[in-house]
Image: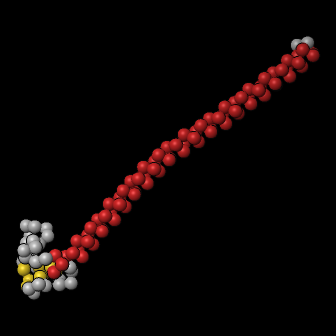
């Protein structure tokens, strides 16, 4: 039902068009279903809700893309740091091994072995 305040009549809603044509009733005077839902207010409310949904989806997508990009760079830096530490430990181990070998060689030389 489309209630028109200009002539106080209830008209069958024109289902072929989304909005009622202005020849039937202007949007500011048209009410939908129950008499208190103004068509202009309904259109504005639907547009605002749709806009908020689209903006929130866009923000979520951007945030997720940013998080993925950030998380990809994070483990790479972490792996690089761990690889450097592993290499440092390996070099220290080789150095200690070389020092032990020199000590053993000195002991062998001292006792003639």
Q: Does the image show residue 100?
A: yes
Q: Is residue 70 left or right of residue 24?
A: right
Q: Does the image show residue 33?
A: no
> Residue 45 sits in which quadrant?
bottom left
Where does residue 48 sit, x and y in percent of width and height?
30, 68
The answer to whether 70 is drawn above or below residue 92 in the figure is below
The answer to whether 87 is drawn above or below residue 9 in the figure is above
* Residue lying farthest to the top in this orientation: 112
Which residue is painted at 21% across and 84% down in the image? Answer: 36
Q: Nearer the viewer, residue 112 or 98?
A: 98
> Residue 20 sits in which quadrant?
bottom left
Q: Nearer the viewer, residue 83 or 42?
A: 42
Q: Is residue 82 left or right of residue 22?
A: right
Q: Nearer the viewer, residue 58 or 80?
A: 58
Which residue is painted at 70% across and 33% down in the image? Answer: 89
* Residue lying farthest to the right in this orientation: 110
* Residue lying farthest to the bottom in this orientation: 8
- Give the color scheme: rainbow, by chain, secondary structure or one colour: secondary structure
Where does residue 1 sit, x and y in percent of width and height?
10, 79
Which residue is painted at 45% across and 48% down in the image? Answer: 68
Where does residue 37 sit, x and y in percent of width and height?
21, 80
Question: How many badges with numbers are in the image?
Answer: 0
Q: Nearer the viewer, residue 60 or 42?
A: 42
Where does residue 40 sit, x and y in percent of width and height?
21, 75
Q: Where does the C terminus fall, quadrant-wise?
A: top right
């Amino acid at each position: 039902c489309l209630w028109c305040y200009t002539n106080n009549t209830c008209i069958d809603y024109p289902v072929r068009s989304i909005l009622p044509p202005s020849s039937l009733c202007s949007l500011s005077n048209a009410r939908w279903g129950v008499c208190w839902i103004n068509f202009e207010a309904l259109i504005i409310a639907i547009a605002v809700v749709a806009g908020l949904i689209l903006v929130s989806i866009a923000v979520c997508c951007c945030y997720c893309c940013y998080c993925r990009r950030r998380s990809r760079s994070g483990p790479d830096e972490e792996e690089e740091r761990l690889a450097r530490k592993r290499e440092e430990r390996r070099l220290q181990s080789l150095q200690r091994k070389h020092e032990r070998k020199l000590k053993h060689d000195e002991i062998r030389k001292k006792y003639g072995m």
